């Protein structure tokens, strides 16, 4: 059995002394650990507050019509955000200090820098220093890259029936107001049956004469849905700015699928070529009829009883348009609009847009563009009406965009090899017009992704669809925008977004969502 050893008085004194000496080192180390942990917490909260302030300030750089006003607004927002996230005297800290600066740090890029400091109290280590506090500091930064935005906006007639026209104007103005005057560049193309460069892109869009919001407020809605030509013109404007360092954006808005193709349509001459498909024995069937859509008047292309004989190389420059729901007699129309068109009998050609006062013939002046061909009334029915004037659909629209899908998105029918227009897109098939219109829009999206007009200009497309919960609309707009849900999503290209607005009341949130996405990438 082992005996228990009893310490002597000398040994007891040594243990007491050793323990006391250890406390001299242990207590400061524990105190230092506590103070360091507290300062770490202060630093973390200070850093997150500075970062939030910098990000809020960068987003606020869109507020104000002058550079100085925007910077003042950004600084004010940074101070407000910092104060909200790190109140004065938080955790007994003192001497809270904040400085905010805005500087140009790159091409069309501004950076907000937030420097924040506080004096944090020392609880234990103050006995080792001459000060009861220590300075804790941090820096927060956020950059905003300026953007070039071309809005491509639907003003077709269907926008009146679904309440979308007024709601679109309100939502579009809200969208515009989120961007920075004198920094961001905004412009707008609107489209119905044809397009209009409604607002040339400029960084002075909030105080120009007129302003972009004023132009938006003046939009009226009528006509068809000619998306492809409008999308091309919007892209053309972005490329024309030639700013590869900016964030280049196209915002496409529509309430339906396209039903118009703008192209140079070959004329089907009054000769044996036409006889191969149609009997031209009756003079009433030989006369093409032009309908002036703007003035509501109908004209013959020739005098009474006399066939009209244009030259065989004449082209129609305009659009093919489908009016759905009007029956087989009015399902396909053609719009003539070429200032360069040459006629063999110009003196007898009726050309609207000359404000005619009666149903008579007018001489071509070369600058009108509102002549429509319609079925019925002696000009045939359905697709037959179009064939009295057009030979076939060309492979490309007038902007070089293919009407034929490279991946069979929408298929077209072609004339057989036995036909005089063998292997050309048939005008016999009434579904070809709509399918060609859809394909040109889809292919225009592919051209934009491929930097077709300028290899150095990367452009991202965002799309908003209103009201038609159809597979065609959803799929087409996802494809154009390169949305991740697109069946042909290309991860190697800029990723866009498609937002669906079921009703006109949803448009404002859809436009704001797109703006937030754009600014997220700009910051």
Image: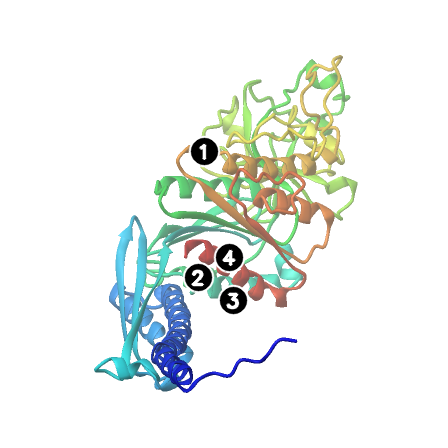
Question: Closer to us: mark 4 or mark 2?
Answer: 4
* First in sequence: mark 4 vs mark 1: 1
Q: CA distance from mark 4 to mark 1?
A: 45 Å
Question: Closer to us: mark 1 or mark 2?
Answer: 2
Report the residue at 73% width, 48% height from top. Answer: 471
Residue 517's disc number: 4
Residue 456 at what x, y percent from top left? 39, 35
Question: Which residue is the site of mark 1?
Answer: 366
Residue 504's disc number: none
Q: CA distance from mark 1 to mark 3?
A: 38 Å
Question: Which residue is the site of mark 3?
Answer: 170
Quarter of the rendering occupied by the N terminus: bottom right
Horizontal relation, residue 160 to residue 414: left or right? left
Q: Secondary structure at mark 1?
A: loop
Question: Which residue is the site of mark 2?
Answer: 176
- How dense is the environment of label 1, judged by Cα within 10 Å: few (below 14), some, or many (20 and up)? some
* First in sequence: mark 3 vs mark 4: 3
Question: Closer to us: mark 2 or mark 3?
Answer: 2
């Amino acid at each position: 059995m082992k005996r228990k050893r009893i310490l002597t008085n000398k040994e007891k004194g040594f243990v007491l002394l050793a323990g006391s000496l250890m406390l001299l080192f242990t207590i400061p180390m524990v105190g230092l650990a506590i103070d360091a942990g507290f300062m770490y917490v202060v630093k973390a909260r200070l850093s997150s507050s500075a970062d939030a302030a910098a990000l809020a300030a960068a987003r606020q750089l869109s507020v104000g019509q002058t550079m100085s006003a925007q910077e003042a607004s950004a600084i004010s927002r940074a101070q407000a955000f910092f104060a909200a996230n790190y109140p004065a005297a938080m955790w007994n800290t003192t001497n809270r200090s904040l400085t905010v600066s805005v500087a140009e740090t790159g091409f069309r890029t501004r950076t907000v820098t937030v420097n924040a400091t506080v004096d944090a109290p020392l609880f234990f280590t103050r006995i080792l220093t001459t000060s009861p506090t220590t300075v804790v500091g941090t820096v927060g930064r956020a950059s905003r890259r300026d953007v070039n935005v071309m809005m491509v906006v639907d003003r077709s007639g269907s926008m009146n029936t679904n309440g979308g026209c007024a709601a679109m104007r309100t939502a579009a103005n809200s969208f515009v107001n989120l961007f920075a005057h004198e920094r961001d560049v905004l412009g707008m193309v609107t489209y119905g049956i044809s397009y209009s460069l409604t607002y040339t892109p400029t960084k002075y869009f909030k105080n120009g004469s007129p302003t972009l919001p004023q132009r938006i407020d003046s939009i009226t809605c009528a006509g068809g849905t000619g998306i492809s030509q409008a999308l091309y013109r919007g892209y053309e404007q972005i490329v024309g700015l030639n700013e590869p360092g900016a964030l280049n954006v196209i915002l496409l808005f529509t309430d339906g699928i396209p039903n118009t193709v703008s192209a140079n349509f070959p004329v089907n001459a009054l000769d044996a070529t036409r006889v191969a498909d149609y009997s031209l024995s009756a003079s009433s069937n030989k006369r093409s009829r032009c309908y002036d859509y703007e003035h509501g008047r109908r004209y013959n292309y020739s005098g009474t009883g006399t066939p009209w004989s244009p030259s065989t190389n004449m082209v129609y420059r305009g659009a093919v348009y489908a009016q759905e729901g009007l029956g087989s007699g009015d399902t396909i129309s053609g719009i003539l609009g070429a200032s360069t068109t040459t006629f063999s009998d110009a003196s007898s050609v009726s050309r609207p847009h000359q404000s005619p006062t009666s149903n008579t013939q007018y001489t071509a002046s070369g600058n009108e563009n509102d002549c429509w061909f319609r079925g019925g009334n002696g000009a045939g029915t359905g697709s037959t009406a179009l064939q009295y004037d057009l030979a076939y659909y060309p492979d490309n629209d007038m902007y070089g965009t293919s009407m034929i899908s490279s991946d069979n998105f929408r298929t077209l029918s072609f004339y057989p090899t036995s036909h005089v227009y063998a292997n050309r897109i048939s005008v016999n098939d009434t579904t070809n017009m709509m399918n060609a219109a859809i394909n040109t829009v889809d292919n225009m999206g592919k051209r934009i992704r491929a930097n077709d007009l300028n290899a150095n200009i990367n452009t991202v497309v965002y799309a908003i669809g209103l009201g038609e919960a159809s597979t065609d609309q959803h799929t087409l707009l996802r494809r154009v925008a390169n949305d991740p849900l697109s069946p042909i999503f290309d991860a190697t290209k800029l990723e866009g977004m498609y937002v669906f607005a079921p009703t006109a009341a949803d448009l404002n949130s859809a436009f704001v969502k797109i703006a937030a996405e754009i600014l997220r990438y700009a910051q």
